[in-house]
Amino acid sequence: MKSRKTGRILLLLVLMMAAVASMPLSAFAEVPYWTNSKEKQGRLIWTQPAYTPEGIFGKELTIPNKDKPGETSPSPLQNPKDLFIDKNDHIYVADTGNNRIVQFDQNGTFVRYITTEGGGKPFNKPEGVFVTDDLDIYVADTGNKRVVRLDKDGKYIRQFEKPNSRYIPEAFKYDPTRLVVDKRGFLYIAVLGGYQGLLQLDPDGNFQSFYGANKTIFSPLDAMKRMLYTKEMYANEISKLPGAISSVAVDNDGFMYTTTAGQGIKSEQIKKLSIKGLNMLESMTFGEIRRFDVRFATGGQVTPQLIDLTIDSNGNVTAIDSSYKYINQYDANGNLLFFWAGPSSANTTQLGLMKNPVAVDANSRNDLYLLDGQEGVIQLFRLSEFGAKVNEANKLTLQGRYEESEKHWREVLRLNENFSPAILGLAKAAYKQGNYQEALELFKRGDDHKGYSDAFWQIRLQWFQSHFSLLASIVVIAAILYAVVEKTTRKTKWRKAWRNRVRSKKEFITQFKHMFYLLKHPIDGFSALRYEQKGGYLSAIILLIGAYAAIVIMRLFTSFSFNMVEIRRVNIIAILLQFLLIWLGWVISNYLVSSIYRGEGRFKDVFVGSAYALIPVILIGIPLAIISNVMTTSELAIYDFLENVLYIWTAAMIFWKIQSLQNYSVGETIVNIILTLVAFMTLAILALVVLGLSSDLKDFIYEVYQEVRLR
């Protein structure tokens, strides 16, 4: 028995070792950080490392010792601000604190210092560097308020100071921090606090335009101020300005990319600019967050701050986040591929983690180099096997070579079955090959509503083409049968008996039938609820159940093409509680306001009328959910129209309900609705306060009870 048990344990251990050995090595690469992607709904997906940290360099810099000829003294990077990699993979660092540019070769070996004194003065706090294909070096010499151009040997050619132009505001401060130069020799300069956009100069330094400016962000509170404040009051408000561009980069096709960081900036943090300076990226929101990392963000800040970016040879955009110390990589359309890294420990340098990432660039092999401004070092991240497979598959997909990408995506999905870009890549490949049912399922799994709709459109088209003659025959036969039956039975006794049947006098049936009268004559219909007892609590409760059922059906059974709600996250109990709390809160608030504001309706009238006002939710919501399953986004205008009819009709019914039951004029009804909303918000705030104090209230009641009992 004992030997048999030992044998089972050994067999189990062998099987476990075999399972581990069969897993991809990349899944177990030892890196000091998590690598994640996201589903379309925003849930985190764990992935194998896309990049692995390979080394750190830049700490061992020295300069000749002036006091001891032949010896050297340490001269590490001090507060460096920018990094650039030229076509030969040489690395240039704007060593801001030491007023120099430092050049390394492709292996990270020191080459030289560039400390020109051309133009009459040395560098003063340079914060940006760019190298052209001709190896001319452009330096954003921030402290000297100029851009300096050097040849490949570091010799001074010329400088670009603030241009003279009547189109530049007098208060404009020319403090260049980052720049790029296009193939024509035009300069695009990001200046400190320059909300006007990039400063565009021609090769001779003449001002051309401001390019790629951001939009001013207005909150709902700002909109309310503009509507309610006088000109004098609004003039005293602090001016709202667009966010300043923090960095700029250029891809192999000459397109400019910018990053914008700052408080309150939650969209278009990364932009790909057209020739007109407009954003071309499909995605609008960038910057990723792991909720459990919020506590590590600089100053407790929650909003990611993307301060620099680079574009590799595949068109992927890699941006660094100074808040969470993440490296975020997106494809050419702005869709997230991966994000990784994080903050390092306070008193040590950790490979793969950073204290203050300030710049990033990619070499010809798509390796990433990260500059840490606080540590004064450069970290090298090399593409892993998994990352290389994803990049190759995604590149083929973006080029429209879906069939070629399929085998690569299947390999990626074998390594990580939850990787959303792989699922969508396979969906596009299946769609291209005409496998629309498979594409439909994959698009749904990848949460791509547009792709799902396109696949369904093809399936629907094929179904109609194969069944059109049958459908047409059924319609024609049904029309003929209806006409024949109608004509032959029109004068029969049973038809006359049906027309002359005795209508039910039961109260519930009468109240239910009144619903249809109310739809055609809403004002008279609501008045009948009050004065003719055409509605009761039972019929109102049944209508409430119907409205709740309609809401649940719309959440659960609306076509995936139109339903942005994730079905597996729908909680019908939570929907019920929300529905009842909002509806009862409205009824109570409206009754209280109407009682004070010259209303004539009783509580029963408000209760019943508010239920009858939800009839459009039932009549439109349920059919809309059903027919959406045979519609595609090409019929989105029809779907939106019907949905808007539902909301507008319901709002109109509520308006007519208040006007009729309370005997108000139009103006009084509007005032009543506004006051009801205010009362509703007040009740909600009071409820939250009571819930917040409930534990203290319970303790207080218990103490009072104990005091009374003891006395």
Image (cartoon, rainbow, N blue to C red):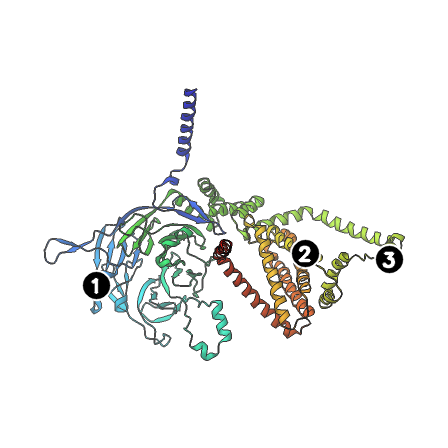
Of badges 2 and 3, the one in the foreground is 2
| Image location of residue 650, percent across then percent down | 65, 63
Q: Secondary structure at mark 2?
A: helix
Please state which of residues 66 and 355 is positioned toward the viewer in this rendering.
355
Residue at the extreme front: 711
Where is the N terminus found, in terms of image quarters? top left
Q: Secondary structure at mark 1?
A: loop
CA neighbours of label 2 inside 10 A, class few (<14), some (14 to 19), many (20+): some
CA neighbours of label 1 inside 10 A, class few (<14), some (14 to 19), many (20+): some
The residue that label 3 is drawn on is: 500
| Image location of residue 55, percent across then percent down | 28, 47
| Image location of residue 126, percent across then percent down | 26, 63
Q: Tag 2: residue type?
A: Ile
The residue that label 2 is drawn on is: 541
Q: Tag 3: residue type?
A: Asn
| Image location of residue 178, percent across then percent down | 32, 63
Query: Mark 1 and 3 residues: CB-CB less than 8 Å, in contact?
Result: no
CA neighbours of label 3 inside 10 A, class few (<14), some (14 to 19), many (20+): few
Q: Is residue 335 visible?
A: yes
**Residue 167 relative to residue 681: left or right:** left
Query: Label 2 to label 3, Cα distance in Å?
Result: 32 Å
Q: Tag 1: residue type?
A: Thr
Of badges 1 and 3, the one in the foreground is 3
Q: Is residue 562 visible?
A: no
Query: Label 1 to label 2, Cα distance in Å?
Result: 84 Å
Q: Secondary structure at mark 3?
A: loop
**Residue 138 relative to residue 696: left or right:** left
Query: Mark 2 and 3 residues: CB-CB less than 8 Å, in contact?
Result: no
Please state which of residues 596 and 711 is positioned toward the viewer in this rendering.
711
The residue that label 1 is drawn on is: 116
Q: Identify the mark nearer the N-term, 1 or 3.
A: 1
Q: Identify the mark nearer the N-term, 2 or 3.
A: 3
